[in-house]
Image (tube, grey):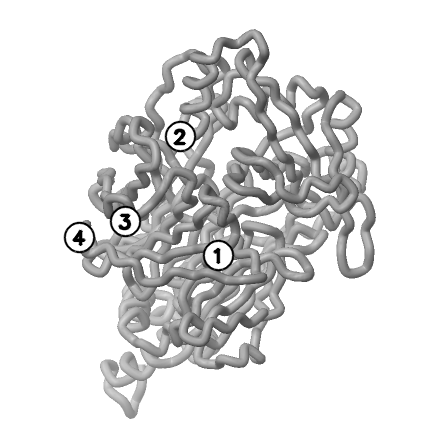
Amino acid sequence: MSDYLPEEVVLEILHRLPVKSLIQFRCVSKSWNSLITSSVFINSYLTLSLSLPSNSNNLIVRHFVDSSCVEHYKLIDDNNDSFDQIQSIEFPLTSRRIQHFVLIGSANGLFSVHKHERFILWNPSIRKFITLPKPCITVKTHGKVTCRLAFGFDPRTNDYKVVRIAFPYRTDMSEEAKPPLIETYSLNEGSWRITSAPFPPGIGFSDWCRPAASLNGAVHFAVHDKYKPGCPLVLSFDLGDEVFRVISVPNGAFHTGDYVHTSVIGGSLSLLCHDTYRHTVNKCCSIWVMKEYGVVDSWTKQFTIKLNGVKIIRVLGLQGNGNILLEANGRLGSELFSYDPKSEQVKNLGICGGPCYFCVDIYMENLVLLNRPNDTVSKRRVSRKRKCRFTMTVIDIILYYGGPLKNANVNKGLSFEGPGIKLEFIQIDRRLKTLDELKKTVMEELCMNSAVHNVQITYRMPHEVLKDRINYKYMAIEADKHVKIMFDKLERISEVTMIELYIQLEPRAEVGIEEFQQTTTSYRL
């Protein structure tokens, strides 16, 4: 390898070089190229990177904002409190119109995204991505399914895995729900496999769209006990032995209506809680940390965040200096803020995006995927008419429900807010044509019985597109023509990337009070 230095010394030097230099040094000789692209070197480089504290100094921020439906990624120096050095990273894939990639999760600087049944692994540090083979569970093989996805790293085998928990779609809500099928993709094996892992009975997901927390060779989801209202839990799936385990949370720590999701903060499993039930919507958040993994008694409430004048959407993570990164409503919509819990000062970092699309993680350079051929992005031009017809395969809808609106001024068209209001993020694969179709979709998603409730739907309609903002109005969806207007707006206004609906449920007059109370109870679970 070298006439002057022993091989072990050269290896030690190479392990401590930045990724950019290693990419360039592949051109030195065939032996260097073979070494740097070997699985042994890639794994050992990762192991060393994980052990160096300096590799936690950068944060990567994902946000989704522009009309081309392209995900944006920015690097932030976590040691720089001024945040004046922000570097953009180009996402290699472009989605058109309302079809875009959804983030599954990230681990060690490797990202997993998907669009319908297309799954991607992307390493921004080496500017390389691969498309995974088609999953075993597809619409053709198993019918329509609803999936909870996760992405994580198994340090025991140095393997990255995508997890799909696929629930069969029920056309008749009176049918007994079938247990989900579990399949995993292994990067080492290069294939999907349906596992025999039994899903715990009585467990429901509290959060369907946030990335699951990857830690200690397992992925962690926020779930709840269907038979015990107000009882959040953590469900882990071990990527090695492929077994589900339920982790309890402190008794009385959370309340019915609290929105809880999992995260990893400071190398510990964490729960980020948003109080949306006790008339404090968007004002109060708390962070719970499991100091000793797997020990229930080690749960500790580390932070309580109460801000006046700033409407918090959710907590995103913790900086190295102890400041908390928040997604909150700003002048231009959802924006990224930094909150100092000591001084209680809030700073707008100047990064804006669509609501609920922000993601913050530690950025770490690695060589994963370097020894694999890179996918290519098609540059083929498509006519506008054909593009709209073929790319509109996934439509994002946010449902607001569970409480009264506090800002019900029709002409202002403000974001839907109010005490007790909860959010449900859904996706559909086609335009709906009738009001009945829309109502059926909403009621099925909220697990409500249309025979018991009348549903009233209000659409936050983009009314006027200006240079720096969009003005909205509220429109009641009362006829098929209103449904058409809703989807036409989404298709024609490129700055709009989702549909926002406020759902109000009222008991039918002919329904008995006992039946209504029973349904209302199930609605609040």
Pointer 3: what residue? 218
Foreground disc of the pair 3, 4: 4
Relative image position of residue 231 (x, y in whole percent): 31, 37
> Disc number at residue 525?
2
Foreground disc of the pair 1, 2: 2
Foreground disc of the pair 1, 4: 4
Ranked by sequence position, the earlier of labels 3 and 4 is 3
Sort mark 2 into few (<14), some (14-19) or many (20+) by Cα contacts within 10 Å.
Answer: some
Quadrant of the image for the C terminus? top left
Q: Which residue is drawn at 58% across and 61% down?
A: 309
Task: Give the SS element for disc 4.
Answer: helix
Which amino acid, mark 1?
Trp
Sort mark 4 into few (<14), some (14-19) or many (20+) by Cα contacts within 10 Å.
Answer: few
Which amino acid, mark 2?
Leu
Q: Residue at x 73, y 27 (%)?
A: 483
- Label 2 to label 4: alpha-carbon separation: 26 Å
Which amino acid, mark 3?
Ala
